[in-house]
Amino acid sequence: MLRLDTNKNKPDFSSTEIRDPLNRVHIDVSQQPKIRVRNLDFYYDENQTLKKINMDIYEKKVTAIIGPSGCGKSTFIRILNRMSDFAASSKVRGEISLERRDIFDPEFSPVELRKRVGMVFQKPNPFPKSIFENIAYGLRINGVKNSHEIEQRAVKSLKRAALYEEVKDRLKESALSLSGGQQQRLCIARCIAIEPEVILFDEPCASLDPISTAKIEELILELKKYYTIVIVTHNMQQALRVSDYTAFFLMGELIEFNETKKVFENPSDKRTEDYITGRFG
Amino acid sequence: MKMQAKSLRQYAAFLMVRAVFLFTSFILLLITGFLLLKGAKVLSFDFIFKMPENSMTAGGIFPAILGTFYLVVMSIIFSAIPGIACAIYLNEYGPKGWISTMIRTSINNLSGVPSIVFGLFGLAVFVKKLGFGVSILSGSLTLSIVILPVIISSTREALMAIPQSMREASMALGATKWETVWNIILPQATPSILTAIIIGIGRAAGETAPILFTAAVFYSKELPRSIFSEVMALPYHIYALVTEGTAPQSQIPIAYGASIVLLFLVIIISLSAIYIRQKHRSAYAKIGH
């Protein structure tokens, strides 16, 4: 991925208000955002898939990103931990800061960033290793050598991911023997074991049944106590149930970003209203 | 009516596939049977473990067996490590695009080059230029070039078959690219890589042309003492007995006997690789590491 340098000045992170394209102030916060996105553009080849995104993500809150397929919501969260680096011939322009630190700074390695900003994917993707090894691997590559500590942290994260009771007697069995919902919770456990600050969920329930989905949603509400969460979802009811803030993306633009309640009850943009009432998408 | 026609077609197709399968198995059995028929009478403990006697009209073929074994093992060592490294680079690190496509095409074309060309190359470079002489080293280096394309392209296919989601899962945990390749990608690709090595073993053991000028001799009085010794090798031994033998009556059965031994040598080496692969597979499927 190539980064275009638009301005030579250091990004200005002093302003605390967010303006939408019509220059209306959306959220006035005294709180410092965990992640701050300013004028973010993203290109695949010559196609601009994200246009001038400005958005703040708050600490220990759940931010939902909704929008129809192809609106750029997955592209957006994959930039937040620089997984987008692997997309060939893509370019990014604009600023993103994690606690005031520019994530594109050459001195801020993507490996370091991903330790702080974890990710759970659309399809559960446990490694074909044992349940225990799935978690231990992440700890080991992050420098935890002591096997006692690895065990402790694995158990703790399995408990926190509400999976421990179901798997405690078969930690040595293959992770692939678990059900889809359990696999996804294992992926969450694997992610939280390395104690990230932010967790990105990319449509985590897309391939799960309603019961597993309910469990994951419950879990997200619980995890909010410890982590900052960003969740991409197709399901508007899900956004309403789990999130504090909602961002509505359409064709690469951030149309509306506000407290979830306001977005759903009183959207300020006609397109948001059309989308959440099911007129398109 | 339509259903009937469909099931008839299905039946015909099944019959055809089965016929082809039986025919192929039959040919294979025919070859093995023919070899056994012609050569079984010379097979004995002494045939395998003794030196040739009486200008190779009697005695054993032990030096040729040992020579082929050395050549196979060393050519696998010389080709497997660079071959796997090359595939990892091409698939995981190298830039995608026309350069990568060109390299891949060249590698595939390389496997189509007649092996005698590699033999000449080995003679010019390893034997003459680098001064290794006619030796195990020159021969196994030449053989390793012959099997290198097989190992690179099969390994690369194995790496490509591993879903991108595995790489993403590892990288998202803060793993570096190398940690991902070493801990996640390679263990999953190992069975396929071993399959490529098994194919390479068969190729290296059977090739005559690459060792013709670089390693093999018709007769040597003693067993090879170092990698710089020239060796007898089974495929060349068979070739020489049949084409240059002075006493065909007694030498041709020896050639058949040597063919049987070569066949079983390849099977034994391959079986050990298959055993390792199975062990790895089941360990990986059950508990994994």
Image (cartoon, grey):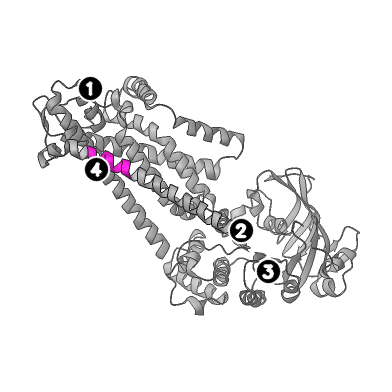
> What is the secondary structure assignment of the residue under circle 3?
strand
Q: Amino acid at mark 1?
A: Thr
Residue B243 marker: 1
Query: Extreme bottom residue here?
Result: A165
Residue A254 marker: none
> Residues at badges 2 and 4 in contact (C-beta under 8 Å)?
no
Q: x%, y% of residue A190?
A: 54, 67
Apparent side of residue B54 relative to residue B261 in the rendered image (left or right): left
Q: Nearer the viewer, residue B281 or A247?
A: B281
Q: x%, y% of residue B45?
A: 11, 42
- Would you say the magenta stretch is mainly helix, strand or loop? helix
Q: Amino acid at mark 3?
A: Thr
Apparent side of residue A14 relative to residue B18 in the rendered image (left or right): right
Q: Are marks 4 and 3 on the same chain?
A: no
Q: Are marks 3 and 2 on the same chain?
A: yes
> Residues at badges 3 and 2 in contact (C-beta under 8 Å)?
no
Marks 2 and 4, how far apart in space? Answer: 52 Å
Marks 4 and 1, how far apart in space? Answer: 23 Å
> What is the secondary structure assignment of the residue under circle 2?
helix
| Residue denoted by label 4 | B264
In magenta segment, residue B123: no
Residue A228 marker: 3
Marks 1 and 2, how far apart in space? Answer: 67 Å
Check the picture and name the quadrant holding the C terminus of chain A: bottom right
- Which of discs 2 and 4 lies nearer the camera? The answer is 4
Q: Chain of mark 1?
A: B
